[in-house]
Image: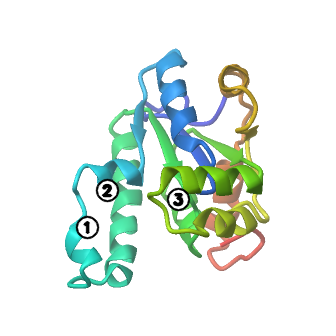
Amino acid sequence: MAEGSDSGYGKIILLHGASSSGKSTIARALQTAIDAPFLHVSIDHLRDAGVLPSARIGSGEFEWAQMRGAFFDGFHQSLAAFARTGNNLIVEHILDTKGWLRDLVLLFSSFDVFFVGIHCSLAELVRREAARGDRKTGSAEHDYRNVHQGLGYDWEIQSEAPLEENLLALIQSWETRPSPSVFAQLARVWANSPSTTSAPP
């Protein structure tokens, strides 16, 4: 069984993929179907709940570029705090900034993390982005060309496949997940060699 299974800590299923790749749809379905209580957490939840002063950022009064680093550092730390206190998490994320993977790997080094890559064709990403209307045009294509480069996963999903099919395969893979996980392997490398560049930063 995967590392961390008897620690009393929460388990983490980390869904990683481009904007509009289907992470939220998969996360909601997974939360409903998986045989354990999981919290579903994403940056979109915080944004939609009004956590950010979005109107004042939009008006230019506050600069998002200056706020972004601290905001995401806090988000990452909060995930570790939730897991450390026994909460299972389904997390949606886009690791589009240098250092974020490393930060999460080291923060989550004591936890059972199942890293899932969510893939989608470029044409479908562009279509979904336009249909949503709440994303900067071109974000999905930028993510498509960058966020998966050089990464390995514990499981990968093509989100254009039927949701039920993906869900069953994901749960089965999670239930039979091997040890060490991708995150555990990276943690062992980076914990012993903080400056190593053998994996994406």
Task: Name the kind of residue labelled 3 in the image.
Answer: Leu
Give the labeled residue for mark 2: 47
User: Residue 168 in the image: x percent, y percent?
Assistant: 69, 19
Disc 1 element: helix
Q: Element under label 2? A: helix
* Position of residue 5 in the picture relative to residue 195 (left or right): left
Q: Amino acid at mark 2?
A: Arg
For residue 67, which quarter of the picture?
Answer: bottom left
Disc 2 residue crowd, few under 14, some 14–19, many 20+, Cα 10 Å: few
Name the one closer to the observer, 149 or 9: 149
> Does residue 31 appear to the left or right of 121 in the view shown?
left
**Camera-side mark, 1 or 3:** 1
Residue 71 placed where, x, y %? 33, 68
Q: Amino acid at mark 1?
A: Ser
**Judging from the image, what secondary structure is the residue with disc 3 in?**
helix
Task: Count how many numbered circles sit on residues in the image.
Answer: 3
What is the distance, in whole Å, between disc 2 and disc 1 at their CAs? 8 Å
Mark 2–mark 3 Cα distance, whole angstroms, equals 21 Å
Residue 86 vs 138, above or below: the answer is: above
Q: Is residue 109 visible?
A: no
